[in-house]
Image: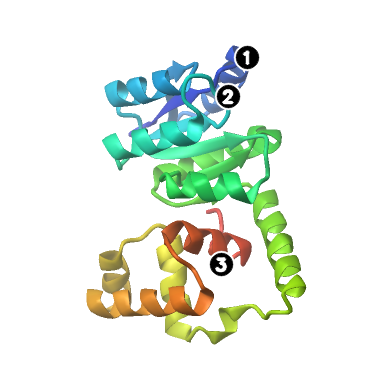
């Protein structure tokens, strides 16, 4: 059995120790390295090529979000799982824009960490359940304040299928193969989805899917 190789990046030694303890209870998970700041995380990720980096947001020298961008740039196959105390849409959107695959709240890390690492290692997104609920509530409140309706109902059934698959991290080519469509057709669906939902990039598309609970943590 191939183990999932994990790098822990957090500036608090006691946090890294706790995360390591939780992960190493599982036979399919192996912590192969640790880093105490963002620069060390980038350097160590380049050396070790882990499957998953568990990355704290607030770290000295280089914050976790900017470190994520560098880690993903040097090895797109590495999945970054952001660890944060803040249930905040701004942090989440920035993390997604930098290439993070998951966002885990520290107060639920002990119960969700193992599942989150396994999901992210598969190339799928993972978000703490509390994040999805909070984002949905904020989104609905925002629509009410602007006296607008949610545009999800404007999507065709095929567009809803494409939206979910894209939000799950699949490429246009993957979606085309799954749905027996041409890549051009998938790109057309993607463009229409973005227009109808007023989205501007993949990160916003994923965030929308989290809000709407279209994607589930597997």
Please indicate whether residue 8 sits to the left or right of residue 13 in the image.
left
Q: Is residue 40 above or below residue 4?
A: above
Residue at the front extreme of this rendering: 146
- Label 1, label 3: how far apart the Cα atoms are: 36 Å
Nearer-N-terminus badge (2/3): 2
- Label 1, label 2: how far apart the Cα atoms are: 9 Å
Q: Residue at position x 67%, y 34% from top?
A: 85
Q: Secondary structure at mark 3?
A: loop
User: Dot 1: within a 10 Å radius of its alpha carbon, few (fewer than 14), some, or many (20 or more) residues?
Assistant: few
- The answer to whether the residue labelled 1 contacts the one labelled 3, judged by CB atoms less than 8 Å apart, is no
Residue sitting nearer the eye, 175 or 61: 61
> At which x and y percent is residue 128?
63, 47
Residue sitting nearer the eye, 91 or 122: 91
Nearer-N-terminus badge (1/2): 1
**Residue 47 visible in the snapshot:** yes
Q: Which residue is mark 2?
A: 19
**Quarter of the image where one finds residue 108:** top right
Q: Which residue is mark 3?
A: 214
Residue at the top extreme of this rendering: 13
Q: Residue at position x 45%, y 71% from top?
A: 163
Q: Which residue is mark 1?
A: 14
Quarter of the N terminus within the rendering: top left
Say which mark, if any, is on residue 82. none
Q: Secondary structure at mark 1?
A: helix
Q: Secondary structure at mark 2?
A: helix
> At which x and y percent is residue 77?
30, 41
Q: Residue at position x 60%, y 16% from top?
A: 12
């Amino acid at each position: 059995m191939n183990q999932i190789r994990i790098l822990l990046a957090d500036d608090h030694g006691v946090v890294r120790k706790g995360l390591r303890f939780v992960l190493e209870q599982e036979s399919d998970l192996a912590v192969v390295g640790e880093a105490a700041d963002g620069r060390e995380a980038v350097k160590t990720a380049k050396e070790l090529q882990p499957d998953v980096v568990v990355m704290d947001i607030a770290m000295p020298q280089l914050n976790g979000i900017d470190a994520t961008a560098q880690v993903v740039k040097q090895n797109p196959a590495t999945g970054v799982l952001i660890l944060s105390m803040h249930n905040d849409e701004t942090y989440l959107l920035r993390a997604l824009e930098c290439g993070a695959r998951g966002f885990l709240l520290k107060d639920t890390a002990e119960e969700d960490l193992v599942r989150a690492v396994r999901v992210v290692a598969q190339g799928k997104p993972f978000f703490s359940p509390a994040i999805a609920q909070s984002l949905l509530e904020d989104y609905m409140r925002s629509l009410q304040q602007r006296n607008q309706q949610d545009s999800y109902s404007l999507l065709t059934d095929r567009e809803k299928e494409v939206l979910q698959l894209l939000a799950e991290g699949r490429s246009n080519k993957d979606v085309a193969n799954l749905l027996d469509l041409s890549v051009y057709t998938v790109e057309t669906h993607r463009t229409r989805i973005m227009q109808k939902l007023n989205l501007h990039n993949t990160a916003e598309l994923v965030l929308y899917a989290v809000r709407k609970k279209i994607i589930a943590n597997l």
